[in-house]
Amino acid sequence: MERFMEQVIFKYLRAEPEDHYFLMTEPPLNTPENREYLAEIMFESFNVPGLYIAVQAVLALAASWTSRQVGERTLTGIVIDSGDGVTHAIPVNVVLSGGSTMFRDFGRRLQRDLKRVVDARLRLSEELSGGRIKPKPVEVQVITHHMQRYAVWFGGSMLASTPEFFQVCHTKKDYEEYGPSICRHNPVFGVMS
């Protein structure tokens, strides 16, 4: 991986890594050991001043920020309500990103199907309660946007261009003090909310 990163940084980006903070992406279930290995390469081999490792799905959600008001920005795509003995998962926003979501009318069909499922569950809740519980209608929103194919890249670009980005990066100083385990936690959620 180190040789690959070397080629990307020096040959394609033509950058001096010591002068730049880096935003890297990872799949949702990446192991902590892989994160630590990436941090080790970036901090020790390339001497970067700061590093942020983001989950690709979160960056795809961030790409949807452009179509919404600043006050509506969210990094949640699903709401989970856990009460005494019952857990409800309610999709609020579904953001489409690349792959098979690029099929024609995929977003419209997904929204229609999700709405049917949600409405059926709400009707069932009302029936099972004997009419005592009348759930409010739930708006299901499937978000498609012009950057859908490149949503992860676009969301990363948006995140890296915010003033808070430098606050959430793991720094070389932190790495030297605590070691690669600093990359096991993700500080973005506490700072940007």
Image (cartoon, helix red, strand yellow):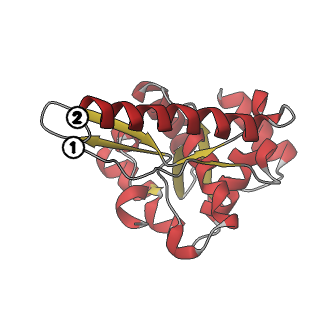
Instruction: State the image coordinates of residue 172 (x, y, percent, origin top left).
Output: 45, 55
Q: Nearer the viewer, residue 67 or 10?
A: 67
Q: Nearer the viewer, residue 157 or 38?
A: 157
Dot label at residue 129: 2
The residue at the point 77 percent across, 27 percent down is 100
Identify residue type, mark 2: Ser
Image-quadrant location for residue 181: top left
Q: Do callouts 1 and 2 mark residues in contact (Cβ within 8 Å)?
A: yes
Identify residue type, mark 1: Arg
Q: Is residue 6 left or right of residue 129?
A: right
Where 173 sits versus 184, above or below? Answer: below
Count residues near mark 1 (Cα–Cα under 10 Å), then give few for <14, some for 14-19, many for 20+: few
> Which SS class for mark 1?
loop
Instruction: State the image coordinates of residue 132 (x, y, percent, origin top left).
Output: 21, 43
Instruction: State the image coordinates of residue 163 (x, y, percent, origin top left).
Output: 55, 75
The residue carrying mark 1 is 132
> Which SS class for mark 2?
loop
Q: Is residue 135 left or right of residue 12?
A: left
The residue at the point 54 percent across, 35 percent down is 38
Label 1 to label 2, Cα distance in Å? 5 Å
The residue at the point 51 percent across, 67 percent down is 166
**Residue 46 shows up from this direction:** no
**Residue 99 shows up from this direction:** yes
Q: Is residue 35 left or right of residue 155?
A: left
Instruction: State the image coordinates of residue 117 (x, y, percent, origin top left).
Output: 52, 31
Count residues near mark 2 (Cα–Cα under 10 Å), then give few for <14, some for 14-19, many for 20+: few
